[in-house]
Amino acid sequence: MRLLIIGQLSGYITEAGRIATQKGAKVAHVDTVEGGLNAIRMGQGGDLVMVDVKLDVYQLVSHLQSERIHIPVIACGIGTDSDAAVRAIKAGAKEYLPLPPDAELIAAVLAAVAEENNTIIANDPSIRAVISLADKIAGSDATVLMTGENGTGKEVLARYVHNKSKRKNANFVSVNCAAIPDNLLESELFGHEKGAFTGAVARRVGKFEEASGGTLLLDEISEMDLRLQAKLLRAIQERVIDRVGGTQPVKVDIRIIATSNRDMESEVNAGKFREDLYFRLNVVNLHLPPLRQRKADIVPLADFFGKKYAEANGVPYRPLSEPARAMLQSHHWRGNVRELENTMHRAVLLARMAEIEPEAIVLSGTQLSTPGGGPAALAGQPWVGRKVEDVERDLILDTLNHCLGNRTHAANILGISIRTLRNKLKTYSDSGVTIPPPQEERAEA
């Protein structure tokens, strides 16, 4: 966790930074919003920004948005000034943190921002074999290609490898190649000079430079455009990158981990992925098995998520009943561990008995009960006699509702890229169809 603190606040910010450091965060500190923006542009930002509420929070957030820099901002202020808190949230801050700092509160904020728990549960022999191989190669600088279906935990395993490596004290930087438009991904990876294109208001380092000394995760690399693949190949081979609009090459020292949910050899044979880049990436292959092949892990994972979301939602922890355990173990889990996590999150919220019973577990592809007690198919109306595009639309919208509006989770369950999902949702919206709002919008409603 990398934390950037902006402001002074009579020394309280320094104390907040000290507490965050004790909790394992790497903390940097600047006094002004402009100084903070420059630090972020030069790769010194990281995972979270804490800013003095008396500074121009709107200026900070609006610049980050216009420059496509996605870092959550937490506003901080002395005491519990409700007006200041409201102004900060309206300006775009995710939260308001009262000062003097409370150690437990700061720990909770850091944990909430981290969100992805890096605990690996590996009881099943199929995943234990993968972890064993990961342990053997973690200490090297070998490039790693991680493959497996959506939701199997490729990013979690990538962080595991990084934390076991000699680079563990340096940055771990992740970029989702499927979530960024092709015309912006080059700048995201390699950075740009001021004025290189419209909107390039200042020099900005890319993910390669930000990760220098550490590990760069290229998530869903098979979605990358062929033209950009050629530039990536040079960067990996020579450990040199060129910023967009730049004239001087920049040396980088990184370990590359790439992930894909596709059959990479088929992608190469189809001409969709460069063969030379594939061989350069595939020095070590770690293939994560789908959850349906990890039967011994289903209940331990469910228990883990049950405890996690009970704590997060402030409700009592309820163990799974035996019928609920059997129900989970017999499911096909197309969305893998991520689908199981979503299922348990819902079950924690719906459960009312001493244990989580089957009635609280809503599985994809099953039947739900309508308010009147009758069955209703998850995908809506019967498929026979309907157009393919209509069935696809209903499936996408029902899956989005199933994921509580979370676009990323829905795309993973559907087996499509987040870009494809967004394009389809825009088409539906343009035709007058009501689209479920994103998860964060629902939380504010």
Image (spheres, helix red, strand yellow):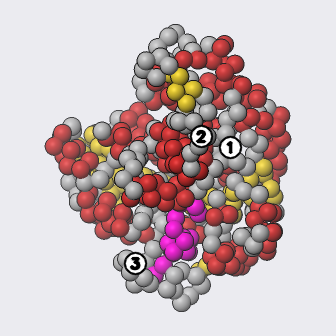
Q: Is residue 106 above or below residue 217?
A: above
Which comes sooner in the sequence, label 2 or label 3? 3
Few, some or many residues within 10 Å of mark 1 (<14, 14–19, 20+): many
Q: Which residue is mark 2?
A: 383
Q: Amino acid at mark 3?
A: Ala
**The magenta stretch spans residue 178:** yes
Q: Are marks 1 and 2 in contact (CB under 8 Å)?
A: no
Few, some or many residues within 10 Å of mark 3 (<14, 14–19, 20+): some
Q: Residue at x 46, y 23 (%)?
A: 370
Apparent side of residue 78 relative to residue 6 in the rendered image (left or right): left
Observer-side mark, 3 or 1, equals 1
Dot label at residue 152? 1
Q: Residue at x 64, y 59 (%)?
A: 220
For the record, the magenta segment spans: 177-193
Between 357 and 270, the residue placed more toward the observer is: 270
Which comes sooner in the sequence, label 3 or label 1? 1
Residue 290 seen anywhere in this rendered image of the structure: yes
Residue 225 sits in quarter: bottom right
Q: Residue furthest front?
A: 385
Q: Quadrant of the C terminus?
A: top left
